[in-house]
Amino acid sequence: MADHYEVLGVARDATPDEIKKAYRRLARELHPDVNPGAEASERFKSVTHAYDVLSDPKQRQQYDLGDQGGFGGGQNFGGFGDIFETFFGAGQQTRGPRSRRERGQDALIRVEVGLDEVVFGTHREIEVDTAVLCQTCQGSCCQPGTSPVTCDICHGTGSIQRAVRSLLGNVMTSSPCGTCRGYGTVIATPCVTCQGQGRVRARRTVPVDIPAGVDTGVRLQMPGSGEAGPAGGPNGDLYLEIKVKNHDVFSRNGDDLLATLEVSMTDAILGTTAKIEALDGDVDVEIRAGLQSGEILTVKERGVTKLRGNGRGDLKVGVQVVTPTKLSSKERDLMQQFAASKKAPAPALSHFQQGLFARLRDRFLG
């Protein structure tokens, strides 16, 4: 890379005013409005970059130190801070410049699924607002047709070294280059689409297969489906946190499905077969004669598919015998005849028992 002083045509000890005058003269000569040629355009860029560096006192000092091998003329006298940085790693030079390519961040989104979807699993198309690869520069961060140029301050090393005179003698210290931020290269012409980031914000659709048996709080990991990394770096991971919505009829206990079946008094006495609508189709349930409220009818393998392992849980149906509240005269006569024939004992106190739903719960979970 050409020397900045030579590009501007000034001496190395030129004053800031001399540097400014040289730049103005060359800019008037090479400006695209005055000289539209391709060669003049490239020289104009070089002149502008050289002026940007030499007109900034800090950058000019770093540039001069880089040209002198990093010793800075031996005129810097550091204190104990420089010594501590050197011996305890704060100022140590890393091995080469750091990469612009970094892994993208992980993302977490919450997904609601119905209990019926949990039985066998489901497929979803989920829209995610995230960072994606810039299609203009394909992650290079540069305008198409251009590429990063070597930093002329650190000469591609990504760090600046200088000698510090201390009580222990001359000690070499190192710090990241302020011009290239430790990358070793400078993007002279950033991509206009992503502003030199190599990625842009966008909405994309992610296909997701939600396995059977998931429950609220379960997190599914999708490697490589998170945010795109800067400068074309690898994607992070996407995590889906599941929330199972409540169902109007069924509830869940582990891999079992729970429900309550209301049975008329006559069906409980005489017995019958009931057809109930389960989450995956109709189920025939046999109601034996003399069935009591609070009993549990179990239908094997009609619960939730197990998340880990084989098979399914059970469908457990708690029975609630419904007593009629209004009877016709004929029905009342029949019931009285039935009561007289059974000679049932008169109502009497017994040990306290919990309510129906509490007993159902205990049986369900027991």
Image: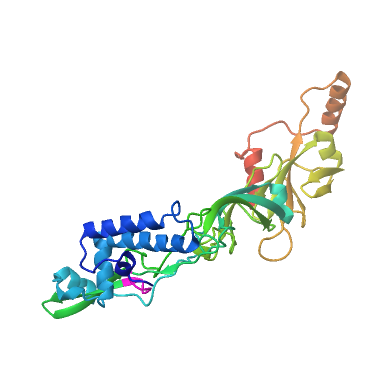
Query: In the rendering, at what x and y percent does residue 299 appear?
Result: 78, 53
Looking at the image, which is closer to me, 44 or 272?
44
Judge left or right: residue 159 versus residue 313: left
Q: Confirm whether the magenta stretch covers residue 4.
A: no
Quadrant position of residue 272: top right
The quadrant the N terminus occupies is bottom left
Quadrant position of residue 25: bottom left
- What type of secondary structure mainly makes up the magenta span? loop
Judge left or right: residue 199 versus residue 54: right
Looking at the image, which is closer to me, 106 or 277?
106
Judge left or right: residue 365 versus residue 159: right
Q: Confirm whether the magenta stretch covers residue 156.
A: yes
Query: In the rendering, at what x and y percent does residue 59 appear?
Result: 28, 63
Looking at the image, which is closer to me, 47 or 90?
47
Judge left or right: residue 279 versus residue 331: left
Count of numbered marks:
0
The way the protein has been coloured in the rendering is rainbow
Query: In the rendering, at what x and y percent does residue 41 appear?
Result: 45, 60
The answer to whether residue 69 of the structure is visible from this angle is yes
Q: Residue at x 81, y 35 (%)?
A: 264
Query: As drawn, which residue projects farthest toward the bottom?
Result: 169
The magenta segment is 153-159
